[in-house]
Image (spheres, coloured by chain):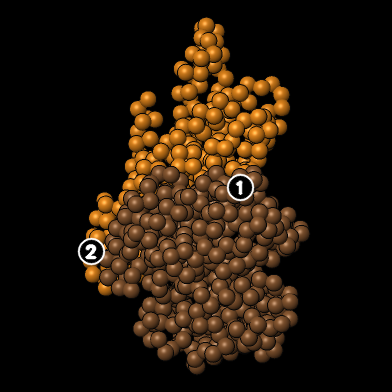
C-alpha cells in the first residue's frame, strides 16, 4: 500500500480548505464550551469553586424543575410514540388517500413552536378560549377548567400541546420505517397462520426497532430541552408547576445574570441527556 | 489555490481598512414606548446628518441583550432604553456613562430618583423618557349605577367588587398572578397600602411582616371576585377582561388607556375611569415603571449619544412623544392644555406618578422578583397559605441577598 505520510516541513495541501471549518468549530463550539466550564467552576473573583455545583443539591426550584422535566419527557414521549405508531399503522394500511392524510397530519409540525404556543395560549384561555367555549357549547360546566393556570392541569396542558405538535414527527419517522420493511417476512408469517397482532409483535416491531430508537432519541433530546411552549404558555407557573430545567437555566443566565450557576446546570442537563440516551439505546438493543 | 487565497485575503484586508460610517445605534423596546423613540431618532438623524440604526427588541429580550452588551463592553449600542428596575444591576461596574450635566427641575422627582446611583446621589446616569406608573382602572358607569364613589381604599374596592359582581354577573375584579413580574406588579400596591414592603432599608427581607401577610390575605379575598385561572394571567388577559366588559376593576399600566377608548378594541369606550392607587393603612401608591435612556460607557459615539438623549427628552420633543402615546416625565408636558384636552387620564397619571414608588433598588431585583412571584402565584393558585407563602419567600430572598454579598 502506498504511504500517505506527509514529508516533514510540508503543509498538507488540504489544510487551507479545512481551516475555515476548524476556525468556525473552535469559535462557535469548542471555545464557548471551555468558557462555560471556566465560569461554572470560578467565582466572581476568578477563584476556583464548586459552589455552583453544590448549590444544585439544595436548590428547591432546580429540584422541582428536574422532576417536572422528567415527568414531562416520559409522559409526552410515551403518548407521542403510541399515537405516532397507531397513526403510522393505520395510514400505512389504507389503500387510498395516504398522501392526503400524511400531508394533513404534518401541519402542526410545520408551525414554528412559538406560533403554536401563542395559538394554544389563546385556545386555553378559560373565559375567551376556544376549548372551554366548545365545552360550554356542548353543555359542560367549565368553571373549574383553568388549563394552564391550574396547579394540577398546567403540566398536562403543556404535554397536550407538545403531543399535538410533535406526534406527526414520530408518525413520519415510523411511517417511513414501515414502508422500508420488506413484505416477504410478513407474507411468510401470514402463510404460517400468524394473526395481525402476532405479525406486528414478532415481525414488524423487531424490524422497526432502529427507526423507533431514532424517533424516541430525537424526541427525548428535544423534550429534555423544552423551552418555547412553556415560556409562552405558563412561564413556569403557576408557582413552579411547569418550571423545567431549560427555563430555569434561561432565567438564571439572562434574567439574573448568573452565568456560572446556569453553566453548572447546563452541564448537569447535558450529562443527564447523554445518560438517558445511552440507557434508551441499551434498552432497545437488549430487546 | 494560491490565487484564490490571495484574492480572499485582499478582499478581507480591504474590508478591514474601510473607514466606518458614523452610525448611532439605539436599542429600544418593541412597543408603543419604543415606537415614539424610533420616530424621534429618525428625525434627529435627519437633522444632524447622522445615520441612526434602531434595534427593536421585545421586552423579554431587551434586558438580556443590553446587559450582555454592557458586561462584555462591545459598544454595540450607543443609547439604550431600559426599564427602571434593571438600572441598579446595569449600574454595577461603571458600565453606564454619567450624564455630562444634571437633569433640570421640570422632570418629575420620582422619575429622577431612579436615574441615580445610591452611592453617588448627586450624579445622574440616565434621563427618564416614559413616565409610567400604575393606575387603578374602574367602570365608572357601574359605580354610578350602584351609587358608589370612586374607590379611595382597598376596602372600597372589595365592597364594590362584591356588590357589582353579585348584581351584574360579571367579575368584580381582575388581576394577574402569573409567576414573576406579573404577580409581583399587582401585589406591590397592596403590600405598600397595608404597610408592608419586600426589603427594609438595610436590604433584609420583611415581606413576612403582619402587613405583608394581611396584604396577601386581602389579595386572595379579591381573587374570589376575579375570573377563574387568574393565577396564570398576564397583562393581556387582564386587559381583555376590561376591554370585553367582563370585569369591573383592575390595576393596570397607562399603555392600556388608549385601548380602553378605542371602539375597534373596546366594548367599554368612555366607561372606564382612571384614579391613583387606593389607600388602606398607608397612602396608596403605584409601582413606578419609568423607561430611561442611558449611554453605555463602551459607546464609541458618546457625544452624539448624549446629544440625542437630551434632544429626545427636551419639552418640545417630549410633547411629540406624548402625542405618539408615551406618558411624559416632565411636569410642564403633563400640564400642557393641548395634551390634557387630548388625554383625559393625564391629571390622574401625574398624580399617580408624583406618589409612585420604584421597586426596591437592588441589583438582585430580577431574582428576588422571580422568587417572590413564585410564592405569590402559589398562594393565588390555592397551594400555599399566605403565612407560609410569605415566610418561604422571605427565607429565599434572604438566601439571594446572602449569595450576592
Q: Chain of mark 2?
A: A
Which quadrant holds the C terminus of chain A?
A: top left
Q: Residue at x 29, y 62 (%)?
A: B398
Query: Residue A267's spot in the image, x, y percent?
Result: 34, 54
What is the residue that sits farthest to the bottom in this orientation?
A: B101
> Is residue B331 shown above or below A245?
below
Write down the residue under mark 1: B165
Q: Nearer the viewer, residue A110 or B195?
A: B195
Residue located 28% across and 61% down the image: B399
The answer to whether marks 2 and 1 mark residues whose Cβ atoms lie closer than 8 Å is no
Say which element carries label 2: loop
Residue found at the very far right of the displayed protein: B263
Disc assigned to residue A49:
2
Placement of B194 over or under A245, stated as above or below: below
Apparent side of residue A134 relative to residue A150 in the rendered image (left or right) = right
Residue B354 x/y as whole percent: 53, 77
Left or right of residue A142: residue A287: left
Residue B264 or A232: which is nearer the viewer? Answer: B264
The answer to whether residue A249 is left or right of residue B262 is: left
Chain in brown colour? B
Q: Position of residue A47 (x, y in %)?
A: 23, 70
Amino acid at each position: 500500500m502506498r504511504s500517505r505520510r506527509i514529508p516533514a516541513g510540508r503543509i498538507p495541501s488540504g489544510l487551507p480548505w479545512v481551516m475555515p471549518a476548524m476556525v468556525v468549530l473552535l469559535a462557535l463550539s469548542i471555545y464557548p464550551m471551555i468558557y462555560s466550564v471556566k465560569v461554572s467552576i470560578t467565582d466572581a473573583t476568578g477563584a476556583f469553586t464548586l459552589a455552583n455545583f453544590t448549590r444544585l443539591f439544595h436548590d428547591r426550584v432546580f429540584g422541582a424543575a428536574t422532576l417536572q422535566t422528567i415527568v414531562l419527557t416520559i409522559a409526552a414521549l410515551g403518548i407521542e410514540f403510541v399515537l405516532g405508531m397507531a397513526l403510522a399503522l393505520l395510514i400505512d394500511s389504507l389503500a387510498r388517500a395516504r398522501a392526503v392524510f400524511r400531508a394533513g397530519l404534518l401541519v402542526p409540525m410545520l408551525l414554528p413552536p412559538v406560533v403554536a404556543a401563542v395559538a394554544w395560549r389563546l385556545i386555553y384561555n378559560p373565559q375567551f378560549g376556544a376549548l372551554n367555549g366548545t365545552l360550554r357549547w356542548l353543555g359542560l360546566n367549565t368553571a373549574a377548567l383553568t388549563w394552564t393556570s391550574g396547579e394540577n392541569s398546567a403540566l398536562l396542558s403543556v404535554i397536550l400541546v407538545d403531543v399535538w405538535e410533535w406526534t406527526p414527527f414520530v408518525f413520519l419517522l415510523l411511517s417511513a420505517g414501515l414502508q422500508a420493511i420488506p413484505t416477504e417476512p410478513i407474507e411468510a408469517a401470514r402463510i404460517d397462520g400468524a394473526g395481525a397482532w402476532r405479525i406486528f409483535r414478532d415481525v414488524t416491531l423487531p424490524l422497526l426497532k432502529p427507526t423507533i430508537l431514532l424517533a424516541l432519541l430525537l424526541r427525548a433530546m428535544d423534550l429534555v430541552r423544552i423551552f418555547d411552549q412553556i415560556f409562552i404558555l405558563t412561564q413556569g407557573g403557576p408557582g413552579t408547576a411547569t418550571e423545567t430545567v431549560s427555563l430555569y437555566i434561561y432565567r438564571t443566565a439572562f434574567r439574573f445574570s448568573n452565568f456560572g450557576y446556569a453553566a453548572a446546570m447546563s452541564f448537569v442537563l447535558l450529562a443527564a441527556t447523554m445518560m438517558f440516551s445511552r440507557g434508551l439505546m441499551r434498552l432497545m438493543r437488549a430487546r | 489555490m494560491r490565487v484564490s487565497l490571495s484574492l480572499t485575503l485582499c478582499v478581507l484586508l480591504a474590508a478591514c481598512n474601510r473607514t466606518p460610517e458614523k452610525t448611532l445605534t439605539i436599542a429600544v423596546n418593541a412597543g408603543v414606548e419604543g415606537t415614539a423613540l424610533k420616530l424621534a431618532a429618525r428625525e434627529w438623524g435627519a437633522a444632524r446628518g447622522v445615520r441612526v440604526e434602531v434595534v427593536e427588541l421585545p421586552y423579554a429580550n431587551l434586558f438580556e441583550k443590553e446587559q450582555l452588551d454592557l458586561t462584555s463592553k462591545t459598544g454595540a449600542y450607543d443609547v439604550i432604553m431600559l426599564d427602571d428596575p434593571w438600572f441598579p444591576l446595569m449600574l454595577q461596574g461603571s458600565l453606564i456613562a454619567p450624564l455630562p450635566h444634571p437633569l433640570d427641575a421640570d422632570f418629575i422627582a420620582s422619575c429622577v430618583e431612579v436615574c441615580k446611583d445610591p452611592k453617588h446621589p448627586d450624579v445622574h446616569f440616565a434621563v427618564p423618557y416614559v413616565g409610567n406608573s400604575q393606575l387603578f382602572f374602574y367602570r365608572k358607569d357601574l359605580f354610578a349605577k350602584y351609587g358608589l364613589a370612586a374607590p379611595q381604599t382597598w376596602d372600597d374596592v372589595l365592597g364594590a367588587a362584591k356588590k357589582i359582581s353579585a348584581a351584574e354577573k360579571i367579575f368584580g375584579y381582575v388581576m394577574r398572578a402569573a409567576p414573576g413580574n406579573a404577580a409581583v406588579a399587582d401585589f406591590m400596591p397592596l403590600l405598600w397600602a397595608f404597610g408592608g414592603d419586600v426589603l427594609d432599608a438595610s436590604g433584609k427581607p420583611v415581606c413576612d411582616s403582619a402587613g405583608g401577610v394581611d396584604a396577601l390575605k386581602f389579595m386572595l379575598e379579591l381573587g374570589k371576585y376575579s375570573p377563574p385561572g387568574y393565577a396564570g394571567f398576564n397583562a393581556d388577559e387582564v386587559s381583555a377582561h376590561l376591554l370585553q366588559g367582563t370585569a369591573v376593576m383592575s390595576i393596570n399600566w397607562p399603555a392600556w388607556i388608549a385601548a380602553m377608548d378605542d371602539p375597534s378594541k373596546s366594548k367599554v369606550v368612555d366607561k372606564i375611569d382612571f384614579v391613583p392607587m387606593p389607600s388602606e393603612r398607608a397612602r396608596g401608591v403605584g409601582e413606578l415603571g419609568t423607561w430611561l435612556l442611558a449611554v453605555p460607557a463602551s459607546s464609541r459615539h458618546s457625544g452624539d449619544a448624549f446629544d440625542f438623549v437630551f434632544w429626545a427628552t427636551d419639552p418640545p420633543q417630549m410633547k411629540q412623544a406624548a402625542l405618539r402615546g408615551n406618558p411624559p416625565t416632565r411636569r410642564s408636558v403633563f400640564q400642557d392644555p393641548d395634551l390634557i384636552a387630548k388625554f383625559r387620564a393625564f391629571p390622574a397619571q401625574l398624580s399617580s406618578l408624583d406618589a409612585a414608588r420604584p421597586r426596591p433598588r437592588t441589583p438582585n431585583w430580577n431574582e428576588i422578583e422571580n422568587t417572590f412571584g413564585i410564592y405569590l402565584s402559589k398562594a393565588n393558585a390555592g397551594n400555599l397559605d399566605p403565612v407560609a407563602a410569605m415566610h418561604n419567600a422571605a427565607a429565599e430572598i434572604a438566601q439571594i441577598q446572602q449569595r450576592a454579598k
